[in-house]
Image (spheres, rainbow, N blue to C red):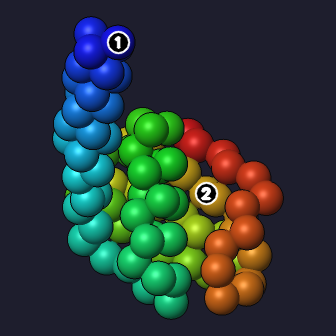
Amino acid sequence: MNKLIRNGLMLSLGLLVAVSAGAKDIQIATNNTAYAPEEVQKLASTAVKMGVKQPLNMNLAAGSLTVSGSSSTSCVIKVGTANTPQIAGISCK
């Protein structure tokens, strides 16, 4: 039983370290959205996973958020016009 508890604690500690290491804020150079910082980081994370390199430039116009960065890749995320983003599609080139 003690071995099971010890292994469970070690697994939990390992997961905690892995999650905290991956929770680094993404660098954003410009942002004209009125979204909460948490929402901006989620959108930025999505763009980075699609190939946009940091620091990011985020430009919201007519319900579409264009995310570009230091690479040639940019993403257009359809977020609508609400106070919080409602992702309806992503296109990256």
Q: Which mark is residue 20?
A: none
Q: Report how far apart the C-alphas of labels 1 and 2 lie in the structure.
A: 53 Å
- Residue shown at 72% from the left, 61% from the top: 87
* Residue 17 sits above or below residue 61 on the image: above
Q: Quadrant of the C terminus?
A: top right
For disc 2, the marked residue is 76
Q: At numbered mark 2, what does the secondary structure look like: helix, strand or loop?
A: strand
Q: Quadrant of residue 53?
A: top left
Q: Position of residue 73 (x, y in %)?
A: 43, 42
Q: Is residue 70 visible?
A: no
Q: Quadrant of the N terminus?
A: top left
Q: Position of residue 46 (x, y in %)?
A: 50, 48
Q: Quadrant of residue 63?
A: bottom right
Q: Nearer the viewer, residue 2 or 8?
A: 2
- Residue shown at 31% from the left, 31% from the top: 12
* Residue 11 sits above or below residue 58 on the image: above
For disc 1, the marked residue is 1
**Left or right: 80, with 60 as reference point:** right
Q: Amino acid at mark 2?
A: Val
Q: At numbered mark 1, what does the secondary structure look like: helix, strand or loop?
A: loop
Q: Amino acid at mark 1?
A: Met
Nearer to us of marks 1 and 2 is 1
Q: Are marks 1 and 2 in contact (CB under 8 Å)?
A: no
